[in-house]
Amino acid sequence: RPCSTRATLEGINKPVIDRIIRVDHAGEYGANRIYAGQMAVLGRSSVGPIIQQMWNQEKDHLKKFNELMVAYRVRPTVLLPFWNVAGFVLGAGSALLGKKGAMACTVAVEESISDHYNSQIRTLMEEDPEKYKELLQIIKQFRDDEREHHDIGLEHDAKAAPAYSVLKTAIQLGCKAAIFLSERI
């Protein structure tokens, strides 16, 4: 099946694009597993539909990055089996703290990811905004979706979670480590 991104393979900075697509695919994969864990615990609660709505967007993001991996011929991170388990455990574990715990996890993760997407946008703009126009549009849209999820978490009492600051900091450190590792291996 022809793909519009195939035509753009010539002249791209392959190491930069590989790193961006690999880590973004891993991040969206991890986000899907986090929401799966939250739904396993809170799916039938009052917050279940809200989590499901965010999860549905993450499924769309993952689908797009699966397509981009094929189009740009990027291998996935070897850490996907680990992110599979770690994401689900983080989602279920935060949900075991209740709605506020799940929303605190959402705020922490989505803030980290939207900041990471902003960094990638800056990198691609410095490289060549016209050459990477399609990828820039995708990343900007997904960044905006992640910011929306962040705001939904705040609207649903994330800051009232037990030990919110500690929880948020720990999750964000985990996100930074996941980003660092997934870009490279």
Image (cartoon, rainbow, N blue to C red):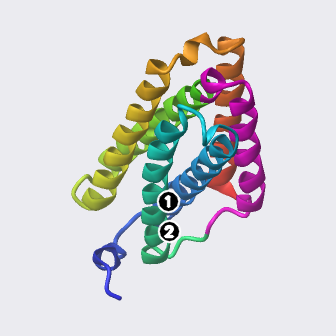
Q: Is residue 1 left or right of residue 34?
A: left
Kind of residue at disc 2: Asn
Residue located 49% across and 57% down the image? 59
The number of callouts visible is 2
Image quadrant occupied by the N terminus: bottom left
Decide which of 95, 130 is in the foreground and name it: 95
Q: Give the vertical position of 23 relative to 163 (above or below).
A: below
The image shows residue 178 at horizontal and vertical percentages of: 68, 44
The image shows residue 12 at horizontal and vertical percentages of: 37, 67
Quadrant in the picture for residue 42? top right
Judge the density around disc 1: few (<14), some (14-19), many (≥20) Cα neighbours within 10 Å: many
Q: Is residue 172 left or right of residue 2?
A: right
Q: Which mark is residue 62?
A: 1
Residue located 34% across and 58% down the image? 135
Q: Which residues are magenta?
A: 76-102
Element under disc 1: helix
